[in-house]
Amino acid sequence: MKIQNEQLAALQRQQEAKQKTTVQDKNLFANLLNEKLEGQPKTETANEQIKVPLVNQLTPTGMSLQTNSEAQLMNRLDNLLSQWENYAGQLDSPQKSLRDIYSSFQNLSSDLKQTKADVSPETHTILRDVLNEIEVLAETEKIKINRGDYLV
């Protein structure tokens, strides 16, 4: 079978069309990604793009905008998470008895209840969400302990 020039020309046109569409698709994806990373859709005014930088709440810049009570709450959340890590480490340790583990869990639960009671309604939603997640984890652990999942 002999390859003719018409077949080669058609194949080259197909490849060129594919390359153009992939370049356009990459540009569309890049534009969409940039738009999502910026947090707001691009607005064009007289061929000029206005970019509004967003301050992430968890960056050091966002942290400086917090109130003193939110900073104290973050320290308490850090303490709760440290207690949670200690509790998880005790569960993995064969030297610890279930009573020791349960007493550390009770300390964690009491600190959690105290922290939850001290949270004001105007506290940032991200911090309240973290506190709620810790509370859900604690209730789940309480059920597991009472059910006997950690019997040795």
Image: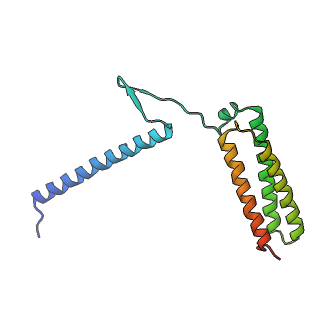
- Does any portion of residue 89 appear in the rendered image? yes
Which sits in the foreground, 10 or 138? 138
Seen at 77% across and 32% down, the residue is 68
Q: Is residue 32 left or right of 136 when viewed as pictured?
A: left
Quadrant in the picture for the N terminus: bottom left
| Residue 3 to residue 35: above or below | below
User: Residue placed at 83% from the left, 65% from the top?
Assistant: 90
Q: Residue at x 65, y 38 (%)?
A: 59
In which quadrant will I find the C terminus?
Answer: bottom right
Which residue lies most toward the top here? 46
The location of residue 19, given as percent across then percent down, is 28, 50
Looking at the image, how many numbered discs can be counted on the residues?
0
In the depicted view, which residue is nearer to us: 40 or 4? 40
| 39 or 14: nearer the viewer | 39
Direction from residue 131 to residue 25 in the image, left or right: left
**Residue 39: % across, % down:** 50, 38
Colouring style: rainbow
Q: Position of residue 49 (x, y in %)?
A: 41, 27
User: Is 34 rendered above or below residue 130?
Assistant: above
In the rendered view, would you say 31 is above or below 22? above
Q: In the rendering, at what x and y percent does residue 125 appear?
A: 65, 42
Residue 96 in view here: no
